Image: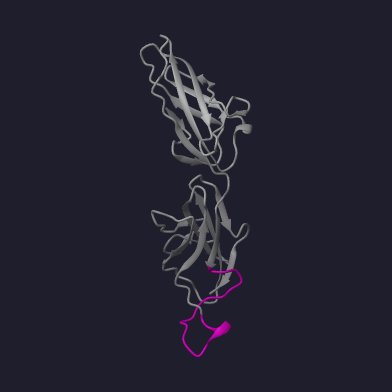
Amino acid sequence: SVTVPSPNGFTNNFSEIQGTAAADLSGLLRMEVKIATPAAAPAWYWTGSSWTSVAFYTTATVTSGTAWSYTVPPAMLAPNQTYSVTPRAYDVSGNTQTALTAAVFTVDSLAEAGVSSIPLTSDYYGGAGAAPFTGSYAPKPISIIAGSAQDSISGVHRIEFELRPSTAALYFDGSLFSLTGSSWNGFNLPVTWAPSAPFVNNLAIPLQSGQHYLYRVRFFDRALNISTDPASGSIDFLY
């Protein structure tokens, strides 16, 4: 069976396929793997150096009596491609594995796209929103921090934000500005996430009037690619 990468999962990059084989009695003699692109029509198979349309098993390395590995050459990988790996074992007694099970995984090398909508850089927030102020002079209470994220391959996995006053390196810890080191706070995300969806957190943040704040948000997809908004620096807003 395949253990690395995780079957039915996502990975952003990997250099080796690993697995195990039950050959406890006589020991594992030889391993082969069939690496294919099942989403393609027709499927393609890896020969060890190139792709072919004919089903092919290539030799893996036996690392112990019950374990094996296969070194993945960079030329084999394509971004956003789904692969299947079917291992086949031969033991010292000459038996060949006949019950073959494929492990499927997807390479996702693209970070998700995410953006903050509240707050925005160089903007101001505060006030109760009472009349008669309207238009660009209307008070803008900031009771939530929000934005949107999109990942059409592996999906959104986690979203975090970092917040501190611009004049002091004291980071928000989820309730107070008390941490001297960088602190990332997680958003509460739905169990099932659409390819594109908004995110909102209703945290009680003790913002001080007249203070500039520096804010960043970062996004993780299920392949653990990371992106940030903004891409560099921070969103600077006035409360």
Q: Name the residue furthest top.
A: 93
Given the current orientation, which residue lies at the most extreme front position? 42
Q: Which residues are magenta?
A: 118-139
Quick one: quadrant of the N terminus?
top left
Query: At which x and y percent is residue 207?
Result: 48, 71
Q: Residue at x 48, y 47 (%)?
A: 222
Rendered view: 109 above or below 63: below
Q: Position of residue 118 (x, y in %)?
A: 52, 69
Please check the rendered image and state whether residue 221 is part of the magenta-colored stretch, yes or no: no
User: Residue 75: image x %, image y %?
Assistant: 64, 32
Report the residue that reaches farthest toward the bottom: 132
User: Which residue appears at 41% of the width and 58% of the height?
Assistant: 188
Q: Nearer the viewer, residue 187 or 6?
A: 6
Give the number of marks.
Answer: 0
What residue is rendered at 45% in x and 33% in y? 103
Residue 187 image offset from top left, x and y in percent: 44, 59
Q: Which sits in the foreground, 165 or 151?
A: 151
Q: Image point 45% across, 64% down: which residue?
A: 200
Q: Which of the pair 39/119 is nearer the observer?
A: 39
Magenta span contains residue 136: yes
Q: Is residue 202 left or right of residue 149?
A: left
The relative height of residue 8 versus residue 196 in the rendered view (above or below) is above
- Which of the 4 quarters of the picture holds residue 93? top left
Q: Main secondary structure of the magenta part?
A: loop
Q: Is residue 120 above or below residue 81?
A: below
Query: Coloured how?
Result: one colour
